[in-house]
Amino acid sequence: MVNLARALTKLAKRSKQACHIDCQRDYDGFMAHVSRRANVAQQVVDHRTKAIAANREKLRSIIKCLVFCGKQNPALRGHRSESFSATSSDTETNPGNFLALLKFRIDAGDTALGTSFQLQGRGPKNVTYCLPQIQNDLLECIEGWIPDTLLESVRAAPFFSLCADEADDASNKEQMPLIIRHIDRQGYVREDFFEFVLCDTGTTGHALAEKVTNEVTEFGLALSKLRGQSYDGAGNMARRLNGSAAELHLAIVSCLNVQQVKNMWCVLKEVGLLFSNSPKRQSALEVQIDTLPFAISNRRKLVDLCRTRWMARQSALVAFADLYVPVVAALEEVSQGRHWSPDSAGAASTLLSSITQFSFICAFCISKHVLEYFHGLTTALQKTSKDICNAYQEVKTVTETLHRVREDIDIYHGQWPRLAESMAEKVGVNASLPRICCRQTNRQNTPAATPKECFKRKIAIPLGDDMCNQMRDRFLNMQQLAFKGLYLIPSTFLEDPARSRDAVSKFAEEYREDPPDPSLLGLPAELDLWEVHWKSRAATEVLPHTTSATLVCTMGNIFPNMQCLLALVCTIPFSAVECEWSVSCLRRLKTYLRSTMGANRLTALALLHTL
């Protein structure tokens, strides 16, 4: 600078130039950084903290998508999920539902995910947290967190019960869903699914029992708090410890001891499979439905016979009765052999001969009307919150009705043959006596003068006797044990206080170790308080009519022994429906396209799907 006289003017002018302002800003930033005297270790920690916060934000969005897919149950993976890119279009590749949902969130404005996928090509692939291995890791975390949360409620409960079932999956492996029933902190009954147990050590009773014991021990639950067990009534699960729905299933199975009824069920199953396994034969049936005047227009197909759900069997009987005439006509068409394979024609001819016999029609009509008495009970026992009191009353009603039908069999059987004759008349079958031979091993040579008398002796009476005996025998334990606890219900207790006191005392004696006062010396005084308490409330409000509602009303009151006994009654499992729902969940999750799914991934997705 030569002219110092104008130096101040030139410096003031230069300070307003952009280059000077940028240099001044850089200098101020440098000095501010030096003044903090941050060391290298602190800078590393700060960078790591920011990275952790960013990764957690990405994981939050990824886990939300994972939970959504688990809840709604679409398949997570696609055909080329490893090659997914946020910049690829839907026409280039199909990454699967999970990754497509992530891309949808990015398009909707999820900046954390968007930044992650933009950096996908400039960093390690595991930074995106979207690989199948990362999915499995996240699902394993979910599989561990959900049961731990549920187990907190189970451990806090005074008692618990186990429910289990057995079913094969799409990979032909035996899976056992494990359900735990308990009372939560608010006094409500809960039945929670915990996991699918792979029966890799066998399906014998000993192997299944060992599996259940090991799983309960791993959950950290004390077997000393186990007060009830409920298993499905089929196969190795058919034991004395079954839920009421399973006991009802076993009771109805007993009707298969009647040979005519057993033959009828087998023929019905084969007829259903004949049409359901062939679209061509199903089309022939639909043509007959549209053509014949006896057909029910709103039914288009037969209902398959379910092996375990007897409500579905009742639906199958109703559907077959509605479509009986079109089924006969369709079988006649197929059996003629024109435009049909020899196998189809032969099978149709055999089944046609079976379903047009009057003995088959009688067995069908009698079985259909007998099983109609169980339709409402079967529906009611499918509720997870089914109270033992209501269930007992419904079972008692059905049992008493069956005994009345058996005692007045002449009156009821007078109606059933007329329905069978009407059904047979539609297809040109005459009512006739079955053939009688010198020696028979698979059917009875019952002497009778008329078809009505013959089928009453061969089908109606044996079927009624079996059903009455099975219902009485299989629900006998419930009547002896659980019924005593039902007298704790206020509406029942106040009807006959003296009788109720005696029943409650006997019930408490059977579970002496469970109440807070094992000596039961204070039980009479507490029963006095119980009677006075509910009598005073009966004048102003409606009393509870179930054990679960009574337990909720007594939470935190001055009845420790009553509260314990009510918890016992509510904990006793009365239905295995939650197990059935878990098996249905297994069918939806592990399909033939997802048959290689691992045990941990299966349980995690099932937990998300059932919650």
Image (cartoon, helix red, strand yellow):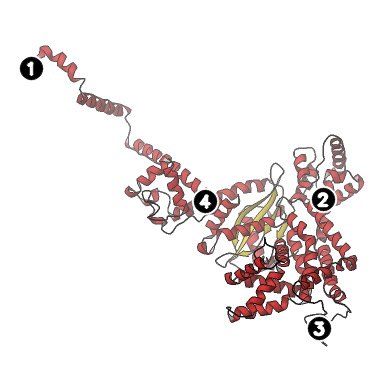
Real-space Cα separation, disc 3 to disc 2, in angstroms? 54 Å
Where disc 2 sits, the SS reads helix
Mark 1 = which residue? Answer: 2
Instruction: Name the residue at 26% across, 26% down.
Output: 25
Real-space Cα separation, disc 3 to disc 1, in angstroms? 138 Å
Looking at the picture, which amino acid does disc 4 mark? Cys
Foreground mark, 3 or 4?
A: 3
Whether residue 259 is visible? no
Residue neighbourhood size for the residue with mark 4, other residues' Cα within 10 Å, grouped as few (<14), some (14–19), many (≥20): some
Real-space Cα separation, disc 1 to disc 2, in angstroms? 112 Å
Residue 485 - label: 2
Foreground mark, 3 or 2?
A: 3
Looking at the picture, which amino acid does disc 3 mark? Arg
Residue 435 - label: 3
Where disc 4 sits, the SS reads helix
Looking at the picture, which amino acid does disc 1 mark? Val
Real-space Cα separation, disc 2 to disc 4, in angstroms? 44 Å
Mark 4 = which residue? Answer: 69
Say which label, 2 or 4, has the lower sequence index. 4
Say which label, 3 or 4, has the lower sequence index. 4
Foreground of the two, 388 or 37: 388
Looking at the picture, which amino acid does disc 2 mark? Gly
Left or right, residue 72 beside residue 409: left
Say which label, 3 or 1, has the lower sequence index. 1
